[in-house]
Image: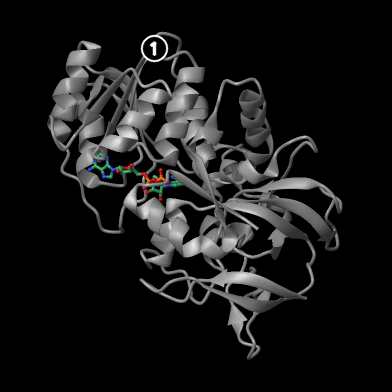
Amino acid sequence: MKVQAAVAVGKEQPFIIKELELDEPRAGEARVRMVASGVCHTDAVVHDEWYPVPMPAVLGHEGAGIVEAVGPGVTSVVPGDKVVLSMSTCGACEYCLSGHPSFCVNMWPLNFGARRMDGSTAFTDENGQPVGSHFFGQSSFAHYSNVAERSIVKVPDSTPLEILGPLGCGIQTGAGTFLNVLKPWPGSSIVVFGTGAVGLAGMLAAIASGATTVIAVDIVDSRLEFAKTLGATHTINSKNEDAVARIKEITHGGAHFALDSTGNKVVFVQMLNSLRPLGHGAMVGAAAMGSEAAVDVGALLMTGIKLSIVLEGDAVPQTFIPRLISLHEKGLFPFDKLITKYRFEDINKAFADSASGVTIKPVLVY
Ligand code: NAD
């Protein structure tokens, strides 16, 4: 069938909306009609060729939509089901089987390969040339896509699909890092470095867990102001003041938990230094390959701190995303406040507004 898709053609070049041919869903795939898709910073870094994803390709990995048709062997969804789309994993390796699918042995080819595992693509252009598909198992920047069953999370009929796509990656990452890995307790102190969608989702989850000293660090004042409206008790613009010294002052010696969502090697060290003894920090930001941070290993020994490197909130999307929806329904996790909606046709504006900091979580509506 013919579908409209936004095609990434290379670094610093705008997405081009064009008609592509979509093939039939194969075994283990469902054809999904997209209702909306979040735009994640990871789409931007892939578009900017930080990672070697073959172009041209249809990116997008926070899709939400309705199942139109299923290929052979698909058992978890039927046509008409509302779904949110997340990462794709093999489901069979030791990491998938032990509940840590984001470290799946096939994480790279299944999510960044922009191909099926047999090398085929679901999309072809007007000349019959392949266009990358299956980005994160879904390539959601298209009105219709053939999606890997492992990427699919069925959600209740009553849920508002237009806001749910970001649960598939950015929101899951921030929230999961706190709910699944750091696990702040009531009364604890937390810091988020970077108040984009990932950092703020983490902050909201920490507040839902009962953290009472909630510090947001960024270099953009408007984002810090917004963080206050979401429940940050303290904000620090690290361009203007020494973030580590200020955090130690606020927390009387360092925070219990910290999240670095900036992908900045200097901030990574600040995050480690802002923890109190036995504190626990997590790094989730995507840094350019080759970024090396200067850490005082000698001084670290005295701290007993823990460091976790977290992908996708260390979540099993099929169980975690329904938990987030339930928290949202109860008013305990208002992630929708991070969202600004754009028409699908305005995809390049959505990316520009995300890069400039104007918009925290753009969502394209189809
Ligand atoms: P974003 O760009 O909206 O947010 C990043 C924030 O960091 C911005 O507010 C920016 O102003 C701030 N920042 C940048 N440099 C800073 C500095 N030196 N000091 C303090 N703050 C600084 O991006 P996002 O959508 O929130 O994503 C955050 C990161 O997480 C990205 O790198 C993204 O690729 C990555 N990511 C990782 C995973 C994962 O599984 N680990 C999943 C999704 C996204």
Task: Using the image as rendered, state which of residue 286 and residue 127 is in the foreground.
Answer: 127
Task: Please indicate, yes or no, whether residue 238 appears anywhere in the rendered image.
Answer: yes
Task: Using the image as rendered, state which of residue 309 and residue 185 is in the foreground.
Answer: 185
Residue ID for mark 1: 212
Residue located 56% across and 44% down the image = 166
Residue located 80% across and 64% down the image = 27
Q: Quadrant of the N terminus?
A: bottom right
Task: Using the image as rendered, state which of residue 87 and residue 330 is in the foreground.
Answer: 330
Residue located 64% across and 65% down the image = 142
User: Percent from the top left, x then y, of residue 45?
Assistant: 39, 60
Mark 1 beta carbon near ligand 1 (under 8 Å): no
The crowd level at tag 1 (other Cα within 10 Å; few <14, some 14-19, many 20+) is some
Identity of the residue furthest to the bottom in this view = 127
Task: Using the image as rendered, state which of residue 337 and residue 251 is in the foreground.
Answer: 337
Q: In the figure, residue 318 lies in which quadrant?
A: top right
| Position above or below: 17 against 152 | below
Task: Please indicate, yes or no, whether residue 110 appears anywhere in the rendered image.
Answer: no
